[in-house]
Amino acid sequence: MNWRGAIENWLNARWYGAAPVPLWLGGLEWIYRRLLALRRALYARSLWHAQRLSVPVIVVGNLTVGGTGKTPLAARLACELRDRAWRPGIVSRGYRAASSHAALLPATATADRYGDEPVWLMQSSGCPVAIGKRRVDAARLLIGAGCNLILSDDGLQHWALARDLEILVIDGARRFGNGRLLPAGPLREAASRAARVDYCVVNGGAAAANEIAMQVQARSALRVNAVSRSLALADLRGQRVHAVAGIGNPERFFLMLEQAGLRVVPHPLPDHHRYDGSELRFADDDIVLVTEKDAGKLARVAHDRVYAVPIELLLPEPWFDTIHQQLCQLRGDRA
């Protein structure tokens, strides 16, 4: 295990387990809380301004560090709203992109240049995607390209972009952990922030009456390299596989495969990991399964036994109709 993995395990034992939080982490939490309050005050007093765009903006985000399923939800939401005659564009931070300047992703975009999540968002949704440290600038590029709706992935804490709807994604198993702010806990903002968003979507686990339940399932695996081949996960039931994941919460990927009946040998890697191919080579000939987000970085290093696992999100269809109606109302009010 590398040093990043060791630190993540140590923190997770305190954030989501019973290990005690040391006092020095509590001191850093106090500083973080004060900085967060100062930032909030600057916006509240209009010393810093949130910029409103000419089209509706939906933000999909979370309160905790790590993966909760917000990026797949942003892609699914874009597809659903496109099917309802909107022209959505997606804004992403573009973590580890070659440049921090705002840019529209071309059809030939690669993860090395634009970041793994933006490329996956474009490929999975078929919608225009723009990246940029300043999300307002990226959103304006999308509007200039003909989009009449902006979806901001992982943008809940990016207050410089005014929003019309906020969707909070919650890990149904881990929820808000120990309920403390960074770094004593996993929270970017206080858990009370959940009461001020428009929708709370719970990924797995039990959803409360005022929350939207989301389940993730996988039924197939697609070979990563140029020789196309598909496998049904049902045909792999009882078979041992290597599962490699460089995402925010790799344990969710491993659990999904186990629930499909596979014997999983897990290989967690840091989020946004850069692959060189050694991570996919093992002494045996077992199949290697990776996430779709990781697959976008493996074209040149994957061997014939590496397969990506597409996921499907199960969500109530009427919820998308409700969002569509809200957006129509916003468009009418703005006109």
Image: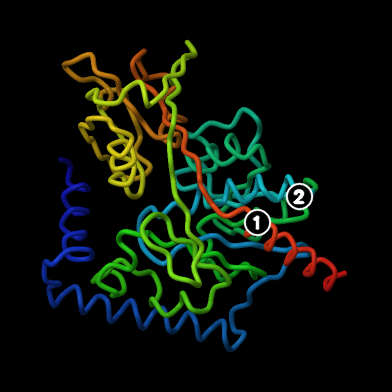
Query: Hey, which residue is sitting farthest right in the picture?
Result: 335
Residue at x 53%, y 31% (from the top left corner): 110
Q: Nearer the viewer, residue 181 or 178?
A: 178
Q: Nearer the viewer, residue 294 or 86?
A: 86
Q: Is residue 202 above or below residue 254?
A: below
Q: Which residue is mark 2?
A: 84
Quarter of the image containing the C terminus? bottom right
Image quadrant assignment for residue 217: top left
Residues at circles 2 and 1 in contact by the CB criterion of under 8 Å: yes
Image quadrant assignment for residue 15: bottom left
Question: In the rendering, which numbered label is found on residue 320?
Answer: 1
Would residue 330 appear left or right of 280 to someone viewing this image?
right
Amino acid bearing label 1: Phe
Mark pair 2, 1: CA separation: 9 Å
Q: Is residue 306 above or below residue 184?
A: above
Q: Where residue 279 appears, x then y in whole percent?
A: 26, 27
